[in-house]
């Protein structure tokens, strides 16, 4: 995208007026923080992602206890983003949505794979999985964006 385009600036101005209860903060990535009611955005970022975070905010997404819940939250936030896209004239393609959901599916796959025998495990707690094949249990870290760690228990 050319440096002269300013869709995010204009969009942000409108969003700040339309969502006065939310705080908008420039940062390294797009994020929704339910604790602070803050949407973090990248200055040169994709407007679709900004609307996606507003989607999380509107749906009041916060805690999730099972990883599959996070994926369903992601999907519903994208549905909301598409509705917002119609309002703010931002086209969000199905490819954009599927690409982003894929990163979550990959993340889920990596977390749920048994570190001992690579069978698909089942989640036993917010940060723990167990293997149905070899009974190995393992712990996963919370952050989706940070490097994935699996620690054998
Ligand atoms: Zn999201
Ligand atoms: Zn196993």
Image (cartoon, rainbow, N blue to C red):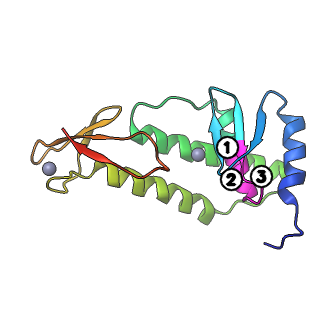
Kindly tell me whether mark 1's CB lies below 8 Å from ligand 1: yes
> Can you tell which quarter of the image residue 48 is in?
bottom right
Secondary structure of the residue carrying numbered label 3: helix
Q: Position of residue 9 (x, y in %)?
A: 87, 53
Examine the rendered structure and indicate whether residue 29 appears above or below residue 73.
below
**First along the sequence among labels 1 and 3:** 1
**First along the sequence among labels 2 and 3:** 2
Task: Residue at 14%, 56% (x, y): give it.
Answer: 117
Indicate which disc residue 85 carries.
3
Q: Which residues are magenta?
A: 40-52
Q: Disc 2 designates what residue? A: 49
Indicate whether residue 21 is drawn in magenta.
Answer: no
Task: Residue at 73%, 58% (x, y): give it.
Answer: 45
Measure the alpha-carbon separation of dots 2 and 3: 11 Å
Looking at the image, do the residues carrying marks 2 and 1 touch, with CB atoms under 8 Å apart? yes
Count of numbered marks? 3
Q: Is residue 140 left or right of residue 63?
A: left
Mark 2 is surrounded, within 10 Å at the Cα level, by few (under 14), some (14 to 19) or many (20 or more) other residues, namely many
- Front residue of this view, candidates 70 and 8: 8
Indicate whether residue 41 is drawn in magenta.
Answer: yes
């Amino acid at each position: 995208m050319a440096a002269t385009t300013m869709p995010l600036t204009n969009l942000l101005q409108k969003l700040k007026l339309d969502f006065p209860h939310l705080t908008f903060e420039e940062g390294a990535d797009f994020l929704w923080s339910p604790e602070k009611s803050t949407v973090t955005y990248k200055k040169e970022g994709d407007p679709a992602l900004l609307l996606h975070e507003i989607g999380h905010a509107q749906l009041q997404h916060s805690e999730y206890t099972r990883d599959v819940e996070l994926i369903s939250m992601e999907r519903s936030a994208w549905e909301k983003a598409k509705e917002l896209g119609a309002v703010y004239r931002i086209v969000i393609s199905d490819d954009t949505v599927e690409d982003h959901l894929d990163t979550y599916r990959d993340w889920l796959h990596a977390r749920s794979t048994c570190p001992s025998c690579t069978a698909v495990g089942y989640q036993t707690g917010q940060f723990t999985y167990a293997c149905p094949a070899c009974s190995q249990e393992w712990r996963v870290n919370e952050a989706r964006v940070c490097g994935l760690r699996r620690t054998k228990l």
